[in-house]
Amino acid sequence: MRLSNIQIPRGTQDILPGVVEKWQFIEKKAKEICGKFQYKEIRTPIFEQTELFQRSVGDTTDIVQKEMYTFEDRGGRSLTLRPEGTAAVVRSYAENKMYGQAVQPVKLYYFGPMFRYERPQAGRYRQFVQFGIEAIGSDDPSIDAEVISLAMELYRELGLKKLRLVINSLGDSSSRKAHRDALIAHFKPSIGEFCGDCQQRLETNPLRILDCKKDRDHELMKTAPSILDYLNDESRSYFEKVKKHLTDMQIDFVVDPTLVRGLDYYNHTAFEIMSEAEGFGAITTLCGGGRYNGLVQDVGGPDQPGIGFALSIERLLSALDAEGVELPHEEAVDCYIIALGDEAMDYSMPLLQQLRREGFSAEKDYMGRKMKAQFKAAERLHAQHVLIIGEDELEKGLAVIKDLQTGEQKDVPLENIVSFLKREG
């Protein structure tokens, strides 16, 4: 049966040549920066056991309740396409006993597609690509500052300037319990005025109410108890040290006591980086992260602290567009071979192979076009040199090589083509 009108699934995108080079540039830049900070790449499966995300991300979160792509395999096991990267990295850290490595903390980074069933909108997709880092094994406030600084450094290197770093402390377990009790007491008398999700969260996870998009303008949101008022001495001291490190590193930030992040595993430091570029859109968050002490233990490992962040490449590209930042995305061809006649066409194939093996980016015509059309093709590929071979040139043992930037052309013996191009650069 012939199929017709098959289109890409809603919430996904094709990344075509001419655009994919921008992605590659961002990935290369991120890997370079991770190398400077001594973070190593890790690659985890695209799907994991569903329980991993239920236990780590949290049963009360929108991600787990509404957005995960979950299915049963043929063995009846519940699997989920990963909606975020931290849980899988932490699972791998615990399963592979990376806590026993000589070099600590373990510093990791990842790239990969994530999947969430949410309403597609500008810069947000159901399949999206995240870049993230995780530093596991240290509870030193300076590693919090380093993680934040790495994200800021990537944005700076890519040319973004209109950024706003927002930080908060969610405190340790005792601080969060005191804050939780205060939130319940604050919202409970009027909880019937809130959406169904918030009503369910009141007893299970009242902190999530502060992150509600439907009720964010409710009067009680403005007067909700601040976590900063419930931090114990240890949590307050920790947060002050993080802020001092950022100040000493000349990284500007704003403290926002309403910042809670959308995942249950966060504690102590939480942060987001926003775009303030005009026309970027209503949802300004580019990057989010924080500390997740206890998560390693939750997924079956020892009690090891950790901190990380994740950012969407799609959102990053939107921010670059909003600020008018152009990324390099086209690589010029070193040499384009114009072959005229059957004999020259046959000769061009081994020559093309030789040039590529010598390290040149090389191309030729495959469409049987006339010389003028082949020149236009070379120009579209931004070729530095055009190499012309016809029957006359083959008889003389020569090729005509033209520099398309200067217009200068020379007759070069066929056996000297490679050495000539190497000299010309």
Image: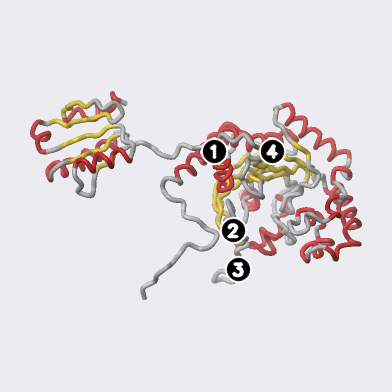
Q: Which secondary structure lies at badge 2? A: loop
Cα distance in 3D space between marks 4 and 2: 25 Å
Residue at horizontal 16 percent and vertical 28 percent from the top: 413
Residue 25 at x, y percent in the picture = 48, 39
Q: Quadrant of residue 402?
A: top left
Q: Are marks 4 and 2 in contact (CB under 8 Å)?
A: no
How crowded pointer 2 is (Cα within 10 Å; few <14, some 14-19, many 20+) is rated as: some
How crowded pointer 4 is (Cα within 10 Å; few <14, some 14-19, many 20+) is rated as: some
How crowded pointer 1 is (Cα within 10 Å; few <14, some 14-19, many 20+) is rated as: few
Residue holding disc 4: 164
Q: Is 116 or 85 nearer to us in this picture?
A: 116
Q: Is 212 or 51 nearer to us in this picture?
A: 212
Question: Quick one: quadrant of the C terminus?
Answer: top left
Q: Amino acid at mark 1?
A: Gly
Residue holding disc 2: 120
Residue 223 at x, y percent in the picture = 87, 50
Residue 301 at x, y percent in the picture = 70, 51
Q: Quadrant of residue 110?
A: top right
Q: Amino acid at mark 4?
A: Arg
Compare marks 2 and 3 and give the one earlier in the sequence.
3
Question: Quick one: quadrant of the N terminus?
Answer: bottom left
Compare marks 1 and 2 and give the one earlier in the sequence.
2
Q: Which secondary structure lies at badge 3? A: loop
Residue holding disc 3: 77
